[in-house]
Image: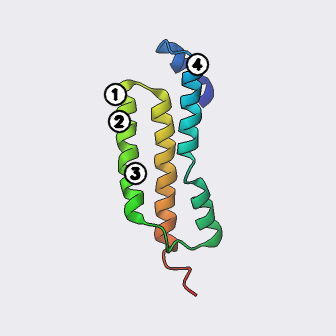
Amino acid sequence: MSILASFFNDYRKYNMSLNPTTIFGIIASALTTFSLLPQLIKIIKEKEAKDISLVMLFVLMAGVSCWIYYGILKEDVIIIVANSVSFLLNGALVAMTIIHKGRGDK
């Protein structure tokens, strides 16, 4: 079963509907989830990350972890999926930042 089919089955299971409010929430979560993707792509392309704050990324990942736990408690698929993807992207950004930190010095 695809992830999308699973998503819609979970919504039916919890008697949730895809009303305008839910759709807006999906759009908002997608935008915030992928907000750091351009930064990750830039680091991968340029192989340089001297100006990226690891502290900020770790604080952000702690916050995202709290959102995942909150989503689990609320049994909210949108919160869980969006923040899980965000956590993975942030983890990749941390890894790329560590790998490429200081490589941009000329």
Is 69 positioned to the left or the right of 102 in the image?
left
* Gap in angstroms between the C-alphas marked 2 and 3: 12 Å
What residue sits right under mark 2 in the picture? 69
Q: Say which of marks 4 and 2 sits in front.
A: 4
Note whether residue 2 is visible: no
Could you tell me which secondary element the residue under label 3 belongs to?
helix
* Nearer to me, 34 or 77: 34
Amino acid type indicated by mark 3: Met
Amino acid type indicated by mark 4: Leu
Is 32 located above or below residue 41 in the figure? Answer: above
What residue sits right under mark 4 in the picture? 18
Labelled pair 1, 2 in contact (Cβ < 8 Å): yes
What residue sits right under mark 1 in the picture? 73
Q: Residue at x 56, y 50 (%)?
A: 35
* Gap in angstroms between the C-alphas marked 1 and 2: 6 Å
Circle 3 Cα neighbour tier, 10 Å, few/some/many (<14 / 14–19 / ≥20): many
What residue sits right under mark 3 in the picture? 61
**Residue farthest toward the right in the current orientation of the protein:** 45
